[in-house]
Amino acid sequence: MKQGPLLLSILTVFFILWLFLISPGFCQDSSAPADIVIKVGRVEKLLEIIDKTAQSMNNQGQAAPSMFLRSMLQGTDWIDPERAIVIGAVFNPAAEKDTSAAALIPFRKPNENFKTNYNAIAGSDYYIFALPPGQGGVVSDPMEEALITASLSAPEGLVSADIAAARLIDKAEPQIKAKLQKLGQQVAQAPETDMDPEQTKQMLSALIETGRQVRRLSFGMDSSKGDFVFFFNIGALANSRLAEVFKSAGEDKDLLLADYTRDYPVHFRSKPYDVNAVMDLLDTHFGPLYQQMGIDFGKLTRIMQYFSGEAAGGIAFDSNGVTMEVIAGLDEKQEVPQDYLETVYIPWLLDYGQAMADYLNEQSPEIKLGPLFQPMPASEVAGHSVNGVRFNMPSTGPEPQMDFEFEMRMTRLDSMILMASDDDRLERLIDKAKHFEKRKAGGPFMEMDIDLDAYLGGIYQLMPDQVKPDKTEIPELGDLTYTLDMAGEKLESRYTVAIADVQKMASYFKALSVQAAEGRGEDLPTPQREDAAPPEEKRTTKAHARNQAPVNASPDKDDPQYWLNKGQLFATYGNVKRAVEHFRKAAEMDPENSLAFFHLGLSYGDNGQYSKAMDAINRAISLKPSDGDYYYARGWIRMLAGNRDQAVADMKRAAQLNDPDAIAYLESINTRSRP
């Protein structure tokens, strides 16, 4: 019932994003292109997905989340579905005013209420306004043209953000240097830390320098053929170090593992790439961090130089523990020692396991870990010498948890390193690998598939009985797929999962959380902001709907409706303080306006000022005692203040007055109380 949440709405979700990314120095630059562009396409499709997903997580009777967005936008049927909603911003570190970005909403028919509430300027078929609205910002002509152009071009997905990273970093260089200096001082003064300030600053500086090589960074979400697609893309500057890494992975090479067949519920594959270039890049960024942990990243780089980057394998979780197989290709241009596993790779693994254990013990002396890797006896499989290690990471919490452990048996076959969980699996893998022939193969540079059914079932079987919940039937699920491609100067990555599977998993994990709470002998937390305090979207939706009927399209400042409209706008964007000021002004101008007191009470409640909230809501009830919404609002405030019995009494009164939210809420608590 909160008026100011930015959750589950398109514009406000990305409004949060740019508020997070953008300092008050953002302004409408008259000459520069937008540094950040956020696009929202196919609003109705996105709302449908949001509602269906929320429905799988919420109790029956809760309002659809899209109701909040629809009321905020004064409906969505007027928005042109063929063009994108666009937010653009330009960074100007020299700006003195707290001006901000601009938004463009394309329309197929005008909406005067929206135009009035957002102080929007109407174009021929769009509205444009400065963000945050209502603060006097002016949108420059170049910015308007840029947003129009962006709106006409097809968005990458339902929602996406596009960031000119290199340009932003160059503009913000003085601020970045100041932040790094301050961070170094904070690290040096922080108690109980072994982080070296200079190494920390060096690592962050390296990350920023890599950011300077990123021409374009984009990410977002799309839907296609019933699937969710989450994407993250990087475009590198021409001739940059990052671009060279991307190019090395995009070269068309014969594949050694093109014939590898997938036999595990979790499986992966990667094509060859320049391992040395990638390891060098990682060393530059994270070498200092590993050094602080006692790990020589340079040694790891030297060990990895023998690999081609091509790999394939799989992993499974079941009652027998973790089982796996991996094939890693060796670089045929390198002279790889014949005893590479025995004299190079396994000794490094053992040293790494000891260094990690030492680091963890130093950070948490009470856990007393031994070496994470232990050597295993050698054997011979299908005429090949086999060595191995056993990994064990015991649980360290006060409650019983899963110990993570597995075995790796390893051998070399020509230009391949083969690994499997036991000698039997390794023998089958050897037989499989003997028949591989090099050839061209399509597909992405890297891919991973997870059979969600098998994965969740395996994790359940691995859980100790003490913490394992009662068997909850795992829903029938498909695959989660990850792909990564690098070609030219671009990196493109995708996570794909069926929308229906996301909804099923949401319901499944909710059922598990309820079951776990009951298994601990605890009552579920009082659902003050969900069940006991029904969600804010429903309350703001009703309030907005009531406002729309009598609204003068252009009220002036002498009209209380003007202050109600402005207060509503501030509440929508989460500015509770300004919302209170405007609703209070409306109530002062019209002491008989029950709606003004209703909104004032909600905003006080949002801000935790429950005494003032009760005074305002009581006034609204005295003016209009037949409105069930007002009793519902008072029940919500009392619930937030901890007065559950009085809150339920208000809900019952609201239900008697046919308030649908109160009826749904009372039904939900009655359902939970039934044996």
Image (cartoon, rainbow, N blue to C red):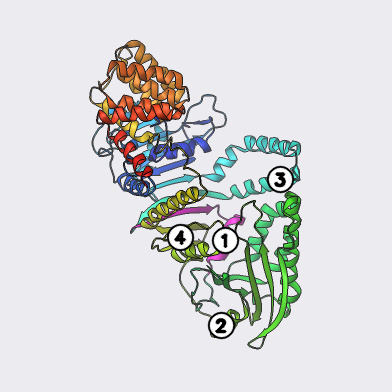
> Which label's residue is closer to the chain start, 2 or 4?
2
Reading the image, the residue beneath label 4 is 471
Q: Residue 360: give x, y in percent of width and height.
A: 72, 54
Residue flagged by tag 3: what amino acid is it? Answer: Thr
Residue flagged by tag 4: what amino acid is it? Answer: Lys
Residue flagged by tag 2: what amino acid is it? Answer: Arg
On residue 464, the disc is 1
Residue flagged by tag 1: what amino acid is it? Answer: Pro
Which image quarter: residue 584? top left
Q: Residue 455: give x, y in percent of width and height.
A: 49, 64
Reading the image, the residue beneath label 2 is 428
- For marks 1 and 4, give the CA distance: 13 Å
On residue 200, the disc is 3
Q: Secondary structure at mark 1?
A: loop
640 is higher (above) or lower (below) than 216: above
Which image quarter: residue 396? bottom right
> Which label's residue is closer to the chain start, 3 or 4?
3
- What is the magenta range? 226-251
CB within 8 Å, label 2 to label 1: no
